[in-house]
Image (cartoon, rainbow, N blue to C red):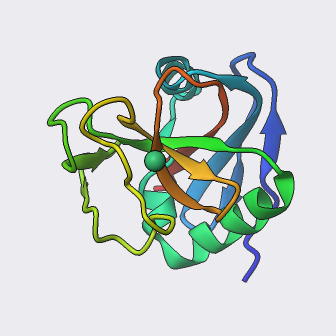
Amino acid sequence: MIHGAILIAFLACGIPASYAGNYEILIADRSMNYANAKAFCDCKGMRLAAASLRDADTSQDILAYTASSGYNYWVGADNLQNGGYDFLWSDGVALPASSNLWAPKEPSNPQSSQLCVQLWNKYNMLDDTSCGDAKRVICEKEVK
Ligand SMILES: [Ca+2]
């Protein structure tokens, strides 16, 4: 089910996001590291995508877009707080290693170099990877 188009926006703040289900979704068409991606979403009054990816309808819209884009995207999940396989979404919900959102054989290296989570274009699923890599960004905001 398509709820609405997903906006491709530049870095400047103040560009309105579009609606997909119960969430405003904003996808940046610039690449940046994880820390800057987080700051980018904050700047928009949003957060890196988390709950929207657990929502069946909204994730369907997002994944339909990202599948055809050819790019990898930062989403809001990392193990920077607890380390190891103890990943947390940006809204504080646990992302277990057993989640079916992970790509095959992922998370692959969360104990050392791969502490942040991307939406990996190869599978259009989650992958733990290096926080310093430059990737595009998906932000969300819950619609009240
Ligand atoms: Ca990995």
For image coordinates 52% across by 78% down, the residue present is: 56
Q: Is residue 19 left or right of residue 9?
A: left
Residue at (82, 59) in percent of width and height: 5
Q: Residue 139, percent across and down?
A: 58, 41
Residue lying farthest bottom?
1
Quarter in which the N terminus is drawn: bottom right
> Can you tell which quarter of the image residue 72 is in?
top right
Where does residue 87 sit, x and y in percent of width and height? 26, 48
Residue 70 percent across, percent down from the top left: 83, 51
Q: Nearer the viewer, residue 62 or 46?
A: 62
The image shows residue 134, relative to residue 49, as above or below, that is above
**Foreground: 66 or 56?**
66
Q: Quadrant of residue 94?
A: bottom left
> At which x and y percent is residue 93?
24, 54
Q: Is residue 119 above or below residue 35?
A: below
Q: Which residue occupies the foreground of this view, 45 or 79?
A: 79
Total marks in image: 0
Q: Is residue 78 left or right of residue 73?
A: left
Residue 96 sits in quarter: bottom left
Q: Residue at 80%, 46% (x, y): give it.
A: 7
Q: Residue at x 77, y 45 (%)?
A: 71
